[in-house]
């Protein structure tokens, strides 16, 4: 799909296409990643946490082996970074040093949520507020590296892409564990979705105040279809735990409305919505993914994560799930290209990441 371009951006594009760097340099100077275990690339490694996976068989298909990614290979954001033209990985905040941070930082943390208490049951993790605090540290470091003020650093990061994928744990590791968390007695599912969105909106405004102008928001996927939730709640004969997916839909519908609101209020910024639920809704067997209800690795009954050093399935390309919660790389290989360049109008709203990157905001 073509991006909606004005005359000025067309001129810029022509110039960009003529430049000798075309095809070489990344399309944006940096990519900042916020989120949970679906995007984490090692931030939990130094923490005392159950949500930590820097051991085999995690990373069995990743060139560097187990890094703290919650999958066999690359995550969706790894592939999006590649599509944006980055040749080196975006490093986790806990490990990113020196000039590396000028091309972005990954703050995502397994177990983290919109609410600070979310994920307490797994131990250490960075909540969205914690990730935003870490981003302030990065801004100061960028200012130092560029010998500039923090305001000038904010201008620099305004040209970058941001992605945020958070909210799953506010259900999995909060609302759906009434033994530990009181939220399900305090809020109806609809009130809870509304409360989450109110808090998320504040966090996204904080991100904007920190200079972010091009922000892609991932929906919460159909977590009622994960082997872990199916094992816990049963399905009454359905393919998934339908009531969980219904809760998540309440959140996602509001998130898409929030995108409209933010674009209306913050006119020099652009927020987009990525509907991974839609992208994943096709027939996965068309892509060779035939095993949808069982994890590829042997999982721990308590954590749903792969048992350390266990031998996983041999053909990771036919399993949708790597462990009891997280998709295999093959699923990310389907999602990332369509988040980047939408294959149907439902994939992204109102534009895709490729167009977001090209957008001339000022
Ligand atoms: C962090 O950096 C150390 C030293 O460079 C490296 O051994 C380790 O694998 C890195 N961890 C991650 C998650 O990148
Ligand atoms: C199964 O059906 C019963 C009765 O309709 C309902 O109370 C329960 O919540 C359902 N369970 C799931 C997992 O959907
Ligand atoms: C996302 O896609 C699903 C599946 O096509 C659709 O039912 C849902 O309405 C979409 N979500 C939003 C918020 O547009
Ligand atoms: C894995 O499964 C896919 C899809 O059925 C198939 O194309 C591929 O050859 C298999 N790979 C191996 C190593 O068996």
Image (tube, rainbow, N blue to C red):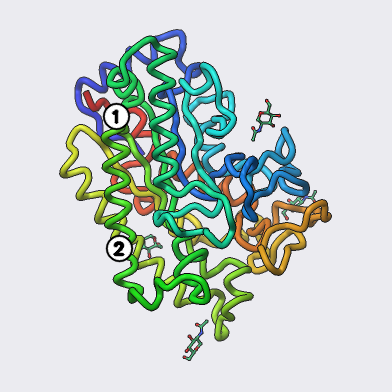
| Residue 235: image location, x then y, percent | 56, 81
Write the residue at 27% across / 21% down: 151
| Residue 227: image location, x then y, percent | 63, 68
Q: Assess whether mark 2 and mark 1 are in contact (beta carbons under 8 angstroms).
A: no
Quadrant of the rendering where the N terminus is positioned: top left
Write the residue at 46% across / 38% down: 33
Give the answer, above or below, for where 152 lies relative to 327: above
Q: Quadrant of residue 210?
A: top left
Q: Is mark 2 within 8 Å of ligand 3?
A: no
Write the residue at 79% across / 55% down: 312
Quadrant of the rendering where the C terminus is positioned: top left
Give the answer, above or below, for where 277 lies relative to 207: below
First in residue order: circle 1 vs circle 2? 2
- Identify the element where label 2 is drawn: helix
Q: Residues within 10 Å of mark 2 (few under 14, many from 20)?
A: some
Of residue 53 and residue 9, the one placed in the foreground of this image is 53
Which label sits in the foreground, 1 or 2? 2
Of residue 323 and residue 357, the one placed in the foreground of this image is 323
Identify residue for label 1: 359
| Residue 315: image location, x then y, percent | 77, 53
Q: Quadrant of residue 82?
A: top right
Write the residue at 54% across / 80% down: 238
Identify residue for label 2: 195
| Residue 57: image location, x then y, percent | 77, 49
Give the answer, above or below, for where 69 lies relative to 249: above
């Amino acid at each position: 799909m073509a991006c909606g371009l004005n005359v000025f951006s067309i001129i810029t594009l022509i110039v960009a296409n003529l430049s000798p760097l075309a095809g070489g340099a990344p399309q944006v100077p940096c990519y900042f990643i916020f989120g949970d275990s679906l995007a984490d690339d090692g931030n939990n490694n130094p923490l005392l946490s159950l949500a930590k996976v820097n051991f085999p068989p995690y990373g069995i298909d990743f060139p560097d082996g187990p890094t703290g990614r919650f999958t066999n290979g690359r995550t969706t954001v790894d592939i999006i970074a590649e599509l944006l033209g980055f040749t080196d990985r975006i490093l986790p905040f806990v490990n990113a040093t020196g000039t590396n941070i000028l091309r972005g930082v990954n703050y995502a943390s397994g177990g983290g949520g919109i609410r600070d208490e979310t994920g307490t049951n797994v131990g250490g993790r960075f909540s969205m507020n914690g990730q935003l605090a870490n981003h302030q540290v990065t801004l100061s470091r960028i200012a130092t590296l560029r010998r500039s003020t923090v305001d000038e650093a904010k201008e620099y990061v305004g040209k970058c892409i941001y992605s945020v994928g958070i909210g799953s744990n506010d259900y999995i590791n909060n609302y759906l564990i009434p033994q530990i968390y009181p939220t399900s007695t305090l809020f109806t599912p609809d009130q809870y979705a509304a409360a989450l969105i109110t808090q998320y909106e504040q966090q996204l405004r904080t991100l904007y105040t920190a200079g972010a102008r091009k922000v892609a928001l991932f929906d919460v996927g159909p977590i009622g279809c994960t082997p872990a939730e199916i094992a816990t709640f049963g399905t009454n004969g359905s393919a998934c735990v339908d009531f969980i997916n219904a809760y998540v839909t309440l959140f996602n519908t509001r998130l898409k409305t929030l995108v409209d609101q933010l674009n209306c209020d913050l006119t020099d910024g652009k927020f987009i919505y990525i509907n991974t639920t839609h992208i994943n809704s096709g027939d996965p067997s068309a892509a060779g993914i035939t095993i949808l209800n069982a994890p590829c690795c042997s999982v721990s009954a308590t954590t749903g994560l792969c048992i350390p050093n266990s031998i996983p399935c041999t053909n990771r390309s036919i399993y949708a799930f790597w462990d009891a919660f997280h998709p295999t790389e093959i699923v990310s290989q389907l999602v990332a290209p369509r988040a980047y360049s939408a294959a149907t109008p439902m994939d992204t709203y109102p534009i895709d990441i490729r167009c977001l990157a090209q957008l001339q905001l000022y």
